Image: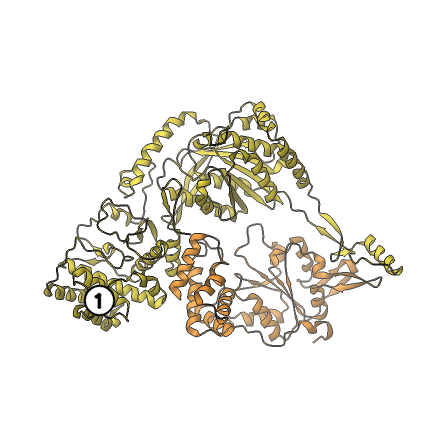
Amino acid sequence: MPLTHTASDGSEQQLFCGPTSFVRALWGFDVRVRALPARANEFIPRRPRFVASNLWLPASPLLGVPGSFSDYLFAACAHISAHLRFGAPRFLIKSLKPAQIAIISLLEDARVERLAVAHYPGLKRLWAPYYEARADGVKTSWSLLSRLARALHDDAYVDDDAWVNKGRQLFSEGRAEWHDSSWCRHIGSALGNDLGQMRVQFNAKDYTVEPAYRDDNLGLWQFEREQIEDGTQLESEGVRRVESDVSSPKQRERGEPEAASLLEGSSERASSLRPKATTEVESVARYPEWDYVIGRERPAFCSVKERPVVPGDAARVATALARYAPARKRLERSALRLADRRPLQVRRLLDGDRLDLPAAIETIVAHASETRTDQRVYRRVRFQSEPPALLLLLDLSESLNAVPANTTSTLLELAHSASALLATSLASVAGDLAIHGFSSNGRHDVGYYRFKDFDEAYDDRARARLAGMRAGLSTRLGAALRHAGRALAVRDSRRKLLLVVTDGEPSDIDVHDPKYLEFDAKQATVSNRRLGVNSYCVGLDANAQECVARIFGVGNYSLLDQLESLPQRIAQLYLRLSA
Amino acid sequence: MSAGPLDAYRIRAEPYYLALADEVSLFEAAYAARLPVMLKGPTGCGKTRFVQHMAWRLRKPLLTVACNEEMSASDLLGRYLLEDGATRWQDGPLTIAARFGALCYLDEVVEARQDTLVVIHPLTDDRRLLSLPARSEALQAHPEFQLVVSHNPGYQSALKDLKPSTKQRFGAIEFDYPARAQEIEILVHETALAQDLAERLVSVAEAARRLKGHGLDEGISTRMLVHAGSLIRQGIGAEAACQMALVRPLTDDQDLILALNASVRACL
């Protein structure tokens, strides 16, 4: 699977999860990978960039770079991580000329790569496809530097240029000094002077680092004025995000062009919705949130507020259910079977714990009367799989009010029917079923509603609460998953199942990075699993497949094409997962 | 030494085992004191091989039971068989070991239902008694009998753990993946790979182990490395062998598969 996929609406979504894991696997430290902001002027080819352990990688394939994009990203990551592993404090520019800076950077690139290859010999093959310099053509500073880079990488490469060969010789003679980056400075300055004497022009503005997987060298140098453009130095301070909620001016400088516009839109929407939310709060629980950028949980970051549900008209539930009578019958029968938890005596087995006496006697009689004997004379106790404790968690964000194509009901009405069908049919195991919902309005306000709770009969009051289901605001999935996970974890069933119905990616008004909540939700699923709670997701948006798969894991989700069938599908799923 | 029923369970040739620390002398001391032993550690790090090796070393027969949820007490103790119109009692593996004096090894003991495991309780304290209710027999364990169990605390959920009353009957030896030099030695011995290639495979494993808790539940085990090595010995290319034996069995997460594949290429 490529790292980048294009969704049907043409928007691209990147997850640099693979490269991050790759660096961790190689060296045991974590880096933060982000997309390199797109640039209007594409005349100058872009290169990856790093400042301390922050990496910026291109979000789409670069022009003229061979091989698959994912190979390229791994090659770039391997190179930058070699800098991080073997590099020294950043070089000071002092009186160096631009050509010398470029050459010293090139030598430093080769130095850290050699050291990395000593640990991981295969890295050389990872990088090899990107060396395209050839020992012919016009000798410009750019072509000579590319040729030197190749000469330092590839011992089999033959070059006729005296300067390239001198560089190669100095580099390999200094083998003993490779542990020391200041050595690069010495031979780099000397080679730069040579280049000047050869009257080869070096234009820093047109210079691009070759080969293409290498970073743009900004991370190697300490600039006196420390102006790296677009505020990247903010990132190197260690903490990415100021812990303010919405519009901090620093965030606007973060070089994420989409952030600002997203911000405006969503806060407007939220304020128009806010009056609809119930203000009465029954209890507040604080949960951590996973920040994938710093690779840590932010403790007590989200507040989940339990709110009472304003009851609706219970009769509405009955009307909605009428459509699903056949499914309901099937489901009821299966639920009855599930409710019967007594261990089964399985008789007439070829192998078992004890003799099945009636069968044994028959066999002995048959043996005595010399007729055909049946050897199945054992019995065994089979413990029935108990019905799991099931929590149906409904995403009640604004998008549920939409009427999808080919349907006559809103998603909310379908979710509502699904809950009603499940609750009605599972009356025999009602104690093990809960139906909750959530919608969020920023991290301090994740609303959580209990329509039907565990150990509660499905009665008129519960039906009225189901009928009072409303949708609005956003989807802070992770916090809701954690809250639901806690509710399930304390059940004493052997199996605990969290069935999540959501219509797409998690989002919230105070988050601008779409990956952030997705990673948090994934983390919440993992920590729920540690509590013994397994999650399964029913996705209502077929375009959200990648996102849902990443959060819940392969095999732990299904996507609905026929949204009308949501109630039946939920019921079928329950039966399949309980068997 | 007892004869007869245990002959099939004797280990004739020495199973290869490279001692990583003092586990061999610990086990010998535990056996001398007849203290039941629990081997803890990640899957594929050599617990089963260690038991085989110790059984050989102590010249004791070894009965192994792979535990599972469906296992009942009679799978351990024994049952009546019907033969020619009459019943005949057949000892289960635990009973055979206790009756005739052998090591009994319950592999992945947490997989068994807790109510099944209580049958080992009187056997594992100073009574050393095995009760066979179906036969109305209380069997005094043979002086050479010893119980060994294995247990992987890593991937068990909160639901699957031993009862404290079961746990406390054992002395425990902790296992982990071997150190680099030892793992290379094991790999070279088991697969006859060239030293250089073995080193690279171990680098792959070390890389993957750094991802434990960062997406992976368990790292690449020594057993998986041996699998990869055997595939290479069969003439499969090293990268393909690593993918088949190391990467694909480990995870289904696409991003991690990409990262692991890149790590494999970096190491080889």
- Residue A116 is situated, as x and y percent measured from the top left of the image, at 33, 65
Is residue B204 something one can see in this rendering? yes
Task: Rate crowding at label 1 as few (under 14), some (14 to 19) or many (20 or more) other CA atoms within 10 Å.
Answer: some
Asked whether, in this view, residue A250 is left or right of residue B75, the answer is: left
When the figure is inspected, residue A395 is found, relative to residue A297, above or below; the finding is: above
Residue drawn 19% across and 55% down?
A207
Using the image as rendered, state which of residue A72 and residue A530 is in the foreground.
Answer: A72
Q: Secondary structure at mark 1?
A: loop
- Residue A53 is situated, as x and y percent measured from the top left of the image, at 31, 54
Give the residue number, with chain letter if any, for mark 1: A135
Residue drawn 58% across and 66% down?
B48
When the figure is inspected, residue B18 is found, relative to residue B116, above or below; the finding is: below
Residue drawn 45% across and 57% down?
B212
Which chain contains the residue that carries disc 1? Answer: A
Image hue for chain B: orange
Q: Which chain is yellow?
A: A
